[in-house]
Amino acid sequence: MKIAVTVFPGSNCDRDTLHILKNILKVDADLVWHKEPDLDRYDAAILPGGFSYGDYLRGGVIAAFSPVMKQVKDMARSGKPVLGICNGFQILVEAGLLPGALMTNISLKFVCRWTKLKIESRKTAFTNLCETGSILNMPIAHHQGRFFVGEEELKKLIDSEQVIFSYVDDAGVKTKEANPNGSLQNIAGVCNEEGNVVGLMPHPERSSEPELSPYLSGDGLLIFRSMLNQLKRA
């Protein structure tokens, strides 16, 4: 299997993601420049965090029109796993591959801190090795991460199990204090209806090695291992 890690002008978590794939999981992976016209040789794509095009206009909106996104859309439609992390999540939303909008944090400030994520569904290509209801420790680092969607769309997301990650406290409860950015119903990540496209604001690549986590957990690795498990089953 071979994984594409897209690189846009302003990406800054691409090499972190590549490190986890190649050096920790020993998977064949490449950095793919945003002008790449062909991703047919890849089995999955990861859109990493950063500030593509400096977040001008709003996070992800310019990158959504980069040439590589046509290929990412084709991969998504064909059922291949596609993951958007932080800015990558913003890009997937702006490209129409995921529902909702990611707005400026309610504090109007950049927020960088560790959060606790509750797994709401394991039906996706990136959570199939997780236990529903389990809690993972992952850091966030963003200015535009407040997830919002209309009332009818929210009901649809909940009914179809498209809400995948929620910010919670130590007891696994969705509280205002546990919500770092004001996201609607503490939503931290969602998927498409098919479950092969997932976006989340927290950074699994920054929590995949116990040595880098204050919790010594390496929880983020479950996200990437789930992707590999999905590809093995395909």
Image: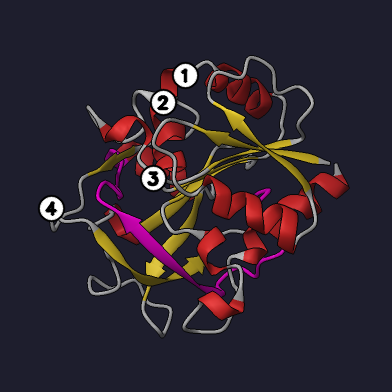
Residue 125 is inside the magenta segment: yes
Q: Which residue is mark 2?
A: 63
Q: Nearer the viewer, residue 41 or 154?
A: 41
Instruction: Please provide percent x and percent y for residue 205.
Output: 56, 59
Region in magenta: 123-151
Q: Nearer the viewer, residue 38 or 185?
A: 38
Mark 1 secondary-structure assignment: loop
Disc 4 marks a residue whose amino acid type is Leu
Q: Secondary structure at mark 4?
A: loop
**Cα gap from disc 3 to disc 1, whole angstroms:** 32 Å
Label 3 with label 4: CB-CB less than 8 Å: no
Asked whether the residues under the numbered discs 2 and 1 touch, taking CB atoms below 8 Å apart as contact, a structural biologist would say: yes
Q: Which mark lies nearer to you, 2 or 4? A: 2
* Amino acid bearing label 2: Ala
Can you tell which quarter of the image residue 91 is in? Answer: top left
Task: Decide if residue 9 is on the left or right side of residue 220.
Answer: left
| Most foreground residue, 199 or 69 | 69
Query: In the drawing, does residue 116 fall left or right of residue 105?
Result: right
Q: Which is more foreground, mark 3 or mark 4?
A: 4
Q: Quadrant of the C terminus?
A: top right
Please report whichever mark, 3 or 2, sits nearer to the chain's N-terminal start: 2
Residue annotated with mark 3 = 155
Q: Which mark is residue 66?
A: 1
Looking at the rendered structure, the kind of residue marked 3 is Lys
Task: Give residue 89's position: percent from left, percent from top.
Answer: 44, 42
Q: Which mark is residue 108?
A: 4
